[in-house]
Amino acid sequence: MRITSFLFLAFLSITTANATDLTVTVSNIQAAQGNVFVALHNSSQGFPDGSRMKGYQVPAHTGRVIVVFVDLPPGNYAISTYQDINGNGILDTNYFGVPVEPYGFSREARSIFGPPLFSDASFMIGTQGVSEEIKLK
């Protein structure tokens, strides 16, 4: 029993020692309306508008909002974010599928038609804390 407890604590300390925090600043918020949704992805599956690893919803404030994802293991990540001005819980688009609410991606990723690829928006998290700023468009 003592060996099992020791091994569990050793494993816990190893995984915690490799975990780090990601601070995300979402800037260029023009109006204090609705909420800002910030989604963290660790895979191309579901990026940018499907399944996510973690996500936050915070009240919008003119200027910027900051969210912190804690205890992330090292790896590749990408962020998608948008301001839900009308409060319906989705990123509204026009007839052609172009967003009509402010949105953004990590690394300022863009594409000509449709959302960017995970590989264009992804960045590496190691064992040190990381900060990313996303300017809403």
Image: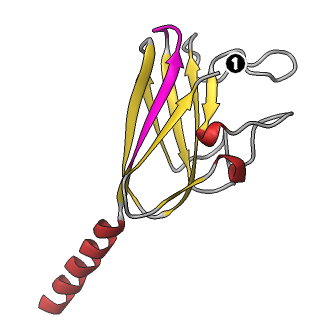
Q: Residue at x 45, y 9 (%)?
A: 32
The residue located at (53%, 10%) in the rendering is 30
Q: Is residue 113 magenta?
A: no
Q: Is residue 93 above or below residue 124?
A: above
Q: Residue at x 39, y 30 (%)?
A: 66
Q: In screen coordinates, is 25 left or right of 96?
A: left
The answer to whether 93 is drawn above or below residue 133 in the figure is: above
Q: Look at the image and tell me in which quarter the C terminus lies.
A: top right
Badge 1 element: loop
Q: Residue furthest left?
A: 2
Q: Position of residue 42 (x, y in %)?
A: 57, 55
From the viewer's perspective, is 104 left or right of 11?
right
Q: Which residue is mark 1?
A: 92
Residue 60 visible in the picture: no
Write down the region rendered in magenta. Answer: 22-33
Q: Which quarter shows the N terminus? A: bottom left
The percent position of residue 62, horizontal first and vertical second, equals 44, 11
In the image, 74 versus 9, the foreground residue is 74
Q: Position of residue 74 (x, y in %)?
A: 46, 64
